[in-house]
Amino acid sequence: MASPRERMVASAALLIRERGAQATAIADVLEHSGAPRGSAYHYFPGGRTQLLCEAIDYTADYVAAKFEKAASGADLLDGMLSFYRKNLVETDYRAGCPALAVAVEAGEPDSPAPVLDRAAATFERWNGLIAQRFVADGMPAERAKDLAVFVTASLEGAIVLARAARDIAPLDVVHRQLRRLLEAG
């Protein structure tokens, strides 16, 4: 059973992926997680910024664990596309990536720099894990690094396009094209 603190972090990540960080208030996180009202500042003395940072870290860890379980680069790619396809359809195209949501909001005056830094570190971590998987599959390191960034950028872009169109087709296109790249390399 998750503690109130853990539920709050997970709830914040889920709300950010649907609403963005700016529209995710502590009151919403408390309601979504079922945590007691006074617990927010008890568990997060750094306030909303700390909670948002930990929600991005939670997201980073969650996705990294999926990457680390992949038996091959193709398995990693297939797993992530399947994961996001399912999330988009099940949430009626509301669920995106919390790290992307934070990055998109970076120009907003109320966007705290530590949260954006966490998003940047998340993408860097994911790119590193993807590149490691590609290298383990026999791909040269430099190509693996470049392709990892391309995979992340393509996947995140496809999520945005799918949400905007309320159609899974952009994910399917990106999936096919990235699979071709992997099979060719």
Image (cartoon, grey):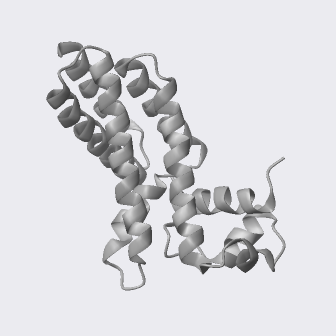
Identified at 38% across, 45% down, the residue is 125
Q: Nearer the viewer, residue 132 or 76?
A: 132
Identified at 66% across, 79% down, the residue is 45
Quarter assignment of residue 117: bottom left
Relative to 137, 28 lies left or right: right
Whether residue 103 is visible: yes
Compared to 142, does 149 lie above or below?
below
Quarter assignment of residue 129: top left
Question: Percent position (x, y) of residue 43?
Answer: 72, 71
Identified at 25% across, 20% down, the residue is 182
Question: Percent position (x, y) of residue 143?
Answer: 16, 28
Relative to 180, 7 lies left or right: right
Quarter assignment of residue 6: bottom right
Question: Percent position (x, y) of residue 184?
Answer: 17, 14
Identified at 45% across, 33% down, the residue is 80
Q: Nearer the viewer, residue 104 or 7?
A: 7
Question: Percent position (x, y) of residue 127?
Answer: 32, 40
